[in-house]
Amino acid sequence: KIAEDKGLGENGFRLVINTGPDSGQEVYHLHVHLLGGRRFGWPPG
């Protein structure tokens, strides 16, 4: 729903979830990025 509301539903998007000590968090929580609007390569980064 959020991707569609942001206009990212037609061509697709990438959802990235970071959590835990290896993600660089000092306060642990679920951290989500919704990426879109351009073509992404693989591997990510």
Image (spheres, rainbow, N blue to C red):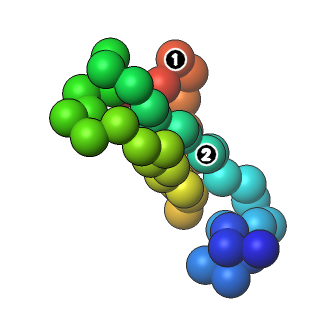
Asked if 3 appears above or below 35 in the picture, the reply is below
Q: Mark 1 points at which residue?
A: 43
* Disc 1 residue crowd, few under 14, some 14–19, many 20+, Cα 10 Å: few
Q: Viewer-proximal residue, 10 or 31? A: 31
Asked if 32 appears above or below 16 in the picture, the reply is below
Mark 2 or 1: in front is 2
Element at badge 1?
Answer: loop
Q: Is residue 5 visible?
A: yes
- Numbered mark located on residue 15 in the image: 2
Q: Give coordinates of residue 17: x percent, y percent.
A: 53, 38
Q: Residue at x 54, y 62 (%)?
A: 37
At label 1, which amino acid type do we have?
A: Pro
Asked if 21 appears above or below 34 in the picture, the reply is above
Q: In which quarter of the image is the C terminus?
A: top left
Q: Viewer-proximal residue, 20 or 8? A: 20
Asked if 8 appears above or below 34 in the picture, the reply is below
Residue 8: quadrant of the picture = bottom right
Q: Can residue 7 be seen in this view?
A: no
Element at badge 2?
Answer: strand
* Disc 2 residue crowd, few under 14, some 14–19, many 20+, Cα 10 Å: few
Between disc 2 and disc 1, whose residue precedes?
2
At label 2, which amino acid type do we have?
A: Leu
- Numbered mark located on residue 5 in the image: none
Specify whether 16 is left or right of 45. Answer: right
Q: Which residue is drawn at 48% across and 25% down?
A: 44
Q: Give coordinates of residue 5: x percent, y percent.
A: 68, 82
